[in-house]
Every structure is written in C-alpha cells, then in structure tokens.
Image (cartoon, rainbow, N blue to C red):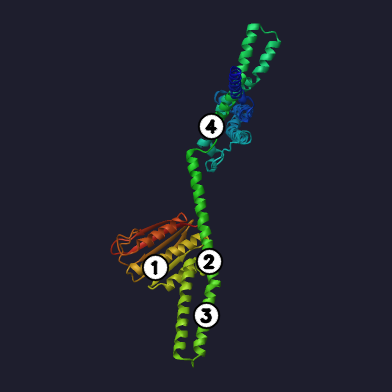
Amino acid sequence: MRGLSLYFCVMTSAELTASRLMTAVAGPLWSRAAWRATKSVLAALFVATIGTALVGVIGVAWGAAIFSLATGAGNIGHIAVYVAAVIVGPVVELWAVQGVTALQRSRLRTVAGTDISAGSRTERKPWPIGPWLSATTWRQIAFHLLSIGIGAAAVVVAICWLAPALAIAYLIVGAPSAAATVSCIGAVALLFAAPWLAQFVARADERLARSLLGPSHTEELALRLESLAKSRAEIVAATDAERRRIERDLHDGAQQRLVSLAMNLGMAMARFTDVPEPVQQAIAEAHEDALLALSEVREFIRGLHPAVLNDRGLKAALSGLAARAPLPVRLNVDMPQPAAPSVEAVAYFIVSEALTNVAKHAQATQAEVAVTRDGDLLRIAVTDNGAGGAVPDGTGSSESGTGLRGLMQRAASVDGTLTIDSPPGGPTVITAELPCES
C-alpha cells in the first residue's frame, strides 16, 4: 500500500508539472494580450499600406514632375502643367502626411490603447511652408517610412498564426512524408511563437510611434511651460477676483457697521451731556476707537483692492495714491487703452508699495510716477530724489530689501520685469514693464 501511494504521488506530481508546462507554453495562444497585440499589428499593416500608397504615390508623382521639368523640353503647356505639379505637390504631400499621421494616432488609441499627444501646433505656422521647416513633419515622414518595416513584421505575425492552416493545405495537396513531418513541426513552432512575436512587434510599433509621432523633448518642455504659464495666469486672476470679493464684502459689511457705530457714538456724545464725566469719557473713547477702526478698515480695503480701480480705472486710482502720499508726488499717466484688470491691479500695487518705500526709507522730498502704454507693454517708472543705495536684498542701505523683492514678485506674477537703478546719493528709479494682456 505504501508503494502504491508513492506511485500515485509521483504520477500526480508529474501530471501537475506537465499541466503547468502546457499552460505556460500554450496559454499565450488564447491570452488577451496576445490577441490585442495581434489586432494592433494587423491594424498597423492596414494603415501602413494606406499611408505608403498615399504618401508614396504623391511623392513619386512630385519627383517625376520635377524630373520632367528639369529634363523635358516640351511646349509652354507642358511646362505650365509640371510647374503647377511642382508647386501643388508639397501642399498635397503635407495633407497626406498629416492625414496619415492622424490616422495612425487614431489607430493606436483605438486598437492599442495608446494615446499619443499631437504636441504644440505653433511650429505649423505659416502654413504650408512652416511645417516643412519643422522637425515634427520630418519625424512623421520617418515614422511612415519605418512603418513599412512594421507592416512587413505584421505579415510575418499573420503567417505564424496561419501556419497550421498552411500546413494542412500543404498536406492536402499531397506532400511527401518527410516534408509533411517537417511542415507540421514548423507549423506548431510558428503557432506557439506567434503570441510572443505579435507582442514584440506591437511594443516596437508603440515605442516608434511615441518617439516619432509624439512631441519631442523640446516640444514637451514648451507644452509644460505653456501649461505653467496658463496655470499661473489663472492663479493670478483667481487671487485678484478673491481680493475683489473680500474688498466688496468688507466695504458692504464691516465698514458700514463701523460707520453706523461711529455715528451712533457721536450722537450719544452730543445727546448725553448731563451724564457723569466717566460715562462721557467712556463714550468719547469708544467713539475714537470706532473712528480709528474705521480708518484702519478703509486702509486695509484699499490695500486689498481699491474700489476706484474698478469704477474709474488706473489713472484715478493712482491719483488717489499720489494725493494721500506723505510727500509731493507728480503723476503722469498716458494710457490710450486700458490694460487687463489683473495687470492694472499689479501696476497699482507696484506704485503703492514703491511710494511707501520712498516715504519710509528713501529720505526723499519729492517723487514722480510715470505710467505709459507702449503697444502691448505697460511701463511704470517711480523716481525719487532720495539718498539712493536701494538694493533688493537690503544690504546697500536702510531701504527695505523685502519690499523691493515684493515689487519684483508682483511684476513677475504677470510675466513682467522690474529693475532698480539706485546709485548712492540718488536718484532712485524703479522701472517695471508689464504685458497688457496677461
């Protein structure tokens, strides 16, 4: 009994090993990955055939027209026809290349599940000369040429899958016994190799498409830069909108309540004159505190986003800044057209912070603000007659380096630039250039 049990254990182990081996060898024949790869390479063969016929025929016709024009000695009509062919050829060829490229991307997305971005279209202008000067077009042409090899490999994959049927047909027509044995063994080998070969060709096709049909490294960096610039513009716009909302809420809410409180306390002071002195003093102090709080809230609101900037524009807002400055400020604004709201807000805060720095640190007796629009650029210049020596890191003088860095950051938030010219002894000139449509 013990020997019999050992025999059955050995047989069971051998059968399990054989089953696992059969699954490992024959499993890929009906695996989803193998059939998906096969569909992908057959679709690649179909599209490559279309692309080769379309692009190749147009290219050959174009070359023949150039050759005939260069070597032929025909009449005027003959020359006119071939000149027209030479001129129209590149346009038609470009349409063909771009059309087959779009078809290849659609094929990869639908059959292989690979989505390849078309990249930036900025290189394609002016059309049709621009695309022929772009590396993207020539990379696409290179892919269409190499896709002929992918198509040939797809034919081999199809032959591998059809090898049993071909072997059976060979046997039916009466193949010799030795040749029949060899054909059967070869058919089985090709059949088992078909899944692996299909997946290998599909991977090669996908890598080739990603490297030649997808955006290049330079295009990827350009797309990323464009995306970052767009995101930053959206953040700046959202921040400006949030500032406006907070300013509006404070103006319509807390500020109005403080105004009402100050008025009520003022009326109480005027009405209750016969109350004890401590009560009158408490009401007077509360009135002063309410007025101080109201003044601070108004200044805070103005620092968030001045309402006059929305209502009357940048010139009126800067006029208010100049009037409130603790030193004489000469203002010159020349803006035939307004800039984008976010740019005008940045311009306002640059002037506001620059004048604050002048009043606190520059030891100046007067300042000048000039704002002009030159095409798509908004130029801002703030000049003072102070001691000079202002540097962004704050090492050159007592002027706040943090404030100057803040000015630079505000300008950079809308893709603008800010420069500071402040030699020792003055004058100090802060110049900012902001794109009007950021």
Q: Residue furthest bottom?
A: 274
Q: Which corner quadrant of the image does residue 30 belong to? A: top right
- Residue 378 disc label: none
Task: Tell me which numbered mark, 3 or 4, is placed earlier along the sequence.
Answer: 4
| Camera-nearest label, 1 or 2 | 2
Give the CA distance from mark 1 to mark 2.
Answer: 23 Å
Residue at position x 50%, y 41% from top? 219
Residue at position x 50%, y 47% from top? 226
Mark 3: secondary structure: helix
Question: Which amino acid is tagged 3?
Answer: Leu
Mark 1: secondary structure: helix
Mark 2: secondary structure: helix
Which residue matches tag 3?
Answer: 261
Task: Tell me which numbered mark, 1 or 4, is placed earlier along the sequence.
Answer: 4
Give the CA distance from mark 3 to mark 4.
Answer: 73 Å
In this rendering, the answer to whether 250 lies above or below 6 is below
- Residue 207 disc label: 4
Which residue matches tag 1?
Answer: 356
Which residue matches tag 2?
Answer: 246
Q: Which corner quadrant of the image does residue 63 belong to? A: top right
Give the CA distance from mark 2 to mark 3.
Answer: 21 Å
Task: Tell me which numbered mark, 2 or 4, is placed earlier along the sequence.
Answer: 4
Task: Tell me which numbered mark, 2 or 3, is placed earlier along the sequence.
Answer: 2
Circle 3 residues within 10 Å: few <14, some 14–19, many ≥20:
some
**Which of the pair 11/200 is nearer the observer?**
11
